[in-house]
Image (cartoon, rainbow, N blue to C red):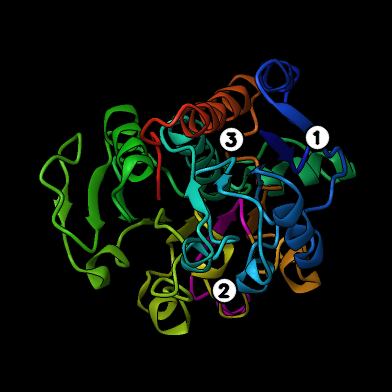
Amino acid sequence: MRLFVTRRMTDAVEAAIADEFDTTFRHEAAPLTQDEARAALAEFDLVLPTLGDAFGAGAFTGQPRCKLLANFGVGYNHIDVEAARAAGIAVTNTPGAVTDATADIAMALILMSARRAGEGERLVRSGGWTGWQPTQMLGLHVTGKRVGIIGMGRIGKAIARRCHFGFGMEVVFHNRSVVTDPGCPARQVSLAEVLRADIVVIAVPATPETHHLIGADELAQMQPHAHLINIARGDILSQSDLIVALEAGTIAGAGLDVYEFEPEVPDALRALDNVTLLPHLGTAAEEVRTDMGLMALANLRAFRDGKPLPNLL
């Protein structure tokens, strides 16, 4: 079976894949365009796509040869799953492997935003720091505060455990279905109550229902000292509304690892000192990316061998 891998993997993953499949590796940095995605579906039996590859509905026109998209990543909003199914193509993803790394980045953003770490580093690098002062760059003390988590799946639970057991935080969360075991002391509440927390973390999947789940109305419900963290997908949060809220001081700060029109980051957002901006580092650790690749390989192997797909969407 012919396999197409859309972007460079770790050496361990590429070696493991090449050992089992007739593989074409694409090492370009940019994601596939829709035309490139359509061509890949027509030429290969299997495709291992990555974040941003344009497998929207238009990519599935014609007579695709491909029978499986083994997505590299837990998020799959770059793939029209329904269109894929209609074309006879199964879609899998790589949950589990990304959980702890993404939760770690959420904690990094919480601390960086609350304690103004990015702003402080820029001050030192600029040569503008004149020495320690009792009232210099006062931020929000994280320990013992209330965290509100929007979305209590694997990643939301991992964030909750870190906040509660690591920082003694009270955890409240909003989830579309009842969560019987959040993994730590936590209360399931309304979205409005979550938004009143000291720190609000977005951890829901990107779906049509969650598009702009957090906009001007929701930001207005947050407290002026609060911080908003997004480690999910960029379009869950209205970026333009966030900029307005940060400029106006509606909230104290934000920490972002994802962006609505990624990789574009607006000048207005980059100009703000009260936002921490990371370049989608959620799973950027070699062992994590290797685990993700090997999980995608497990899906590919199961399909080849006629076995149930471990992570079928």
Q: Which residue is drawn at 89% across and 41% down?
A: 127
Magenta stretch holds residue 74: no
CA gap between label 2 and label 3 equals 24 Å
- Region in magenta: 243-258
Q: Position of residue 8 (x, y in %)?
A: 78, 34
Looking at the rendered structure, the number of numbered marks drawn on it comes to 3
Q: Residue at x 81, y 59 (%)?
A: 36
Residue 162 lies left or right of residue 26; in this view the side is left
Q: Position of residue 181 (x, y in %)?
A: 14, 40
Q: Where is residue 299 in the image (x, y as percent from the top left)?
A: 49, 33
Which residue of the protein is positioned furthest toward the left in this rendering? 180
Q: Is mark 2 on a helix, strand or loop?
A: helix
Residue 143 lies left or right of residue 113; in this view the side is left
CA gap between label 1 and label 3 equals 24 Å
Residue located beneath label 3 in the image? 283
| Labels 2 and 3: the sequence-earlier one | 2
Three-letter amino acid code at the position of disc 3: Thr
Q: Please name which of the two marks, 2 or 3, marks the residue nearer to the observer.
A: 3
Q: Residue 24 carries which label?
A: 1
Front residue of 86 and 296: 86
Residue located beneath label 2 in the image? 242
Query: Pointer 2 and pointer 1: residues touching (CB < 8 Å)?
Result: no
Three-letter amino acid code at the position of disc 2: Leu
Q: Label 1: few (<14), some or many (≥20) within 10 Å?
A: some
